[in-house]
Amino acid sequence: MKDQWALYSKKVMEHFKHPRNVGEIKNPDGVGRVGNPICGDVMELYIKVKDDKIVDAKFRTFGCGAAIATSSMVTEMVKGKTVKEALKISNRAVAEALDGLPPIKMHCSVLAEDALKAAIEDYLAKKNKKNK
Amino acid sequence: MKKIYLDYAATTPCHPEVIEEMLPFFNQIYGNPSSVYQLAQKAKGAIEEAREKVARLLNAEPEEIIFTGGGTEADNMAIKGVAFANKKRGNHIITSRIEHHAVINTCKWLEKQGLKVTYISVDKFGVIDLDELRKSLTDKTILISIMHANNEVGTIEPIQEIAKIARERGIYFHTDAVQTAGKVPIDVKESGIDMLSLSGHKLYGPKGIGALYVRKGVKISPLIHGGHHERNRRAGTENVPGIVGLGKACEIASKEMANEEKRLRELRDKLYKGLNERIDDIILNGHPHRRLPGILNICVKYVEGESMLINLDLEGICVSSGSACTSGSLEPSHVLLAMGVPAEVAHGSLRFSLGRNTTQKDIDRVISVLPSIVEKLRAISPFGKEAKSKEYRG
Ligand code: FES
């Protein structure tokens, strides 16, 4: 018998126990709020953008351990990336950065990807308005 | 760190005396009970003794007890067994929306085979609507299957009334007593129960063994065909150690039930009181007093259940949740939904189930640990803002 059978990887547990970037950003440049159609969880993601680079990201999540860990991880991953680069971050990449998720929890990482996309779209929409 | 196990409704550890009683049947008295020599007849004798002990717990006759591979098999045997054997009498079954999946999914499968099934609603406490049940009866109804107590919220159903309704119409009444056998008194004769399922591992016996009580005269078809075991009703060489263990577990339960019931009820009420004083916006699920002594089910608003479970696990505390995120099907508890709990609130449900080894200290520990877990998760939750902050005492 393996003596370590656990639902989540050490990395997931690390982010779950000490989630990074929890909260809101005052006057954010983009906000994404998405719900998970599968189990009904909700994530909010805030981004601050300077010269097309994401300089800060924060989140609030109502969901399982995997949802909280992927939220935390995605906010870490986007910081310092250009908007274009950030748009390429997939849910798989977030899951991999956490050393994987159990198959039944993969949909939770989709929440993180969708929230990020929604926040960036919000940012781009606002920017377009300003430029008009 | 000491493990605090509060998931006795999921399963229980084997009682040490149960294990002791079982051991000789693995490698000393290992004969096949169907054989003639003494080594085998001893095993057969042990089975019959165990049957008497199970019967005694329910006030049934030993011949009315059939050993099965567990509670799920007992439920399957009762429902399919009646459906198959009574095709000429009818094709309609009545059950409830809050049954265990062993009953609900068996009924759903029978619907696919052409039977009709009515799923009765419950009120906000999880109590069956008796009027709806009466109105659902038809000339074709052959079986009513309603659980004795619900496994998630602990609400005890009015089975005596249901049995009476069934008896008056000549309809069989089955009850899933997996959560109640050995926990609260059951008298199948007095209650007018025709069939009753129980499971070994929920009452400090081993896993993989259960029993179905079938009142003399009730017609059921066997599900498993083969040899002449269990009076032709359940073929297959008997799980002798399991049966012996179940018998012992029933014997112990008969003795300890009354004291244990009182002790657990007190501990459980303390747990609720302590949590309610320290955490805002929690809701008690299930009937306020017509409820199993060891079960406390609450919804903690604005947080999700699995994230609470994992935090509790990090503190060595084992409980369960009706959250969609823990369900495997990713749907919230069908029981809470049937009771009218909104899906997002059901998401934050926690079930504490207490048992033999639960102490006051365990309860105190949960009361001291859970409030800060909830506080932390509410700070992460987008709905947390809605929760009023409250000073944590103690
Ligand atoms: S958020 Fe519901 S399962 Fe992960």
Image (spheres, coloured by chain):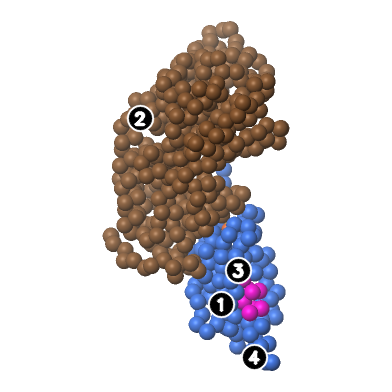
Identity of the residue drawn at 43% across and 40% down: B155
Image coordinates for residue B88, horizontal then vertical, percent: 68, 20
- Is residue B81 in sight in this rendering? no
- Point out the stretch of residues depicted in magenta: A115-122
Asked where in the image residue B299 lies, by quadrant, the reply is bottom left
Tags 2 and 4 on a common chain:
no
Depth check, mark 2 against mark 3: the one in front is 3
The vertical placement of B71 against A57, above or below, is above
**Which chain's colour is blue?**
A
**Disc 3 or 4, which lies upstream in sequence?**
3
Q: Which chain is brown?
A: B
The tag on residue A46 is 1
Q: Nearer the viewer, residue B181 or B92?
A: B92
- Between marks 3 and 1 in the image, the one whose residue lies nearer the viewer: 3
A84 over B167 or under it: above or below: below
Q: Chain of mark 2?
A: B
Residues at marks 2 and 1, CA–CA distance in whole angstroms = 56 Å
Relative to B263, say whether B222 is above or below. above
Residue at the disc numbered 2: B257
Crowding around mark 4 (Cα neighbors within 10 Å: few <14, some 14 to 19, many 20+) is: few
Q: Position of residue B168 (x, y in %)?
A: 50, 22
Main SS class of the magenta portion in the image: helix
Picture coordinates of residue A127 (x, y %)? 65, 87
Please indicate whether residue B61 sits to the left or right of residue B108 in the image: left
Q: CA distance from mark 2 to mark 4?
A: 73 Å
Label 2 packing within 10 angstroms: few (<14), some (14-19), many (20+): some
> Which residue in the protein does label 3 denote?
A34
User: Which secondary structure lies at badge 3?
Assistant: strand
Are the residues under badges 2 and 1 in a single subunit?
A: no
Q: Is label 4 in a helix, a strand or a loop?
A: helix
Do circles 3 and 4 both sit on a common chain? yes
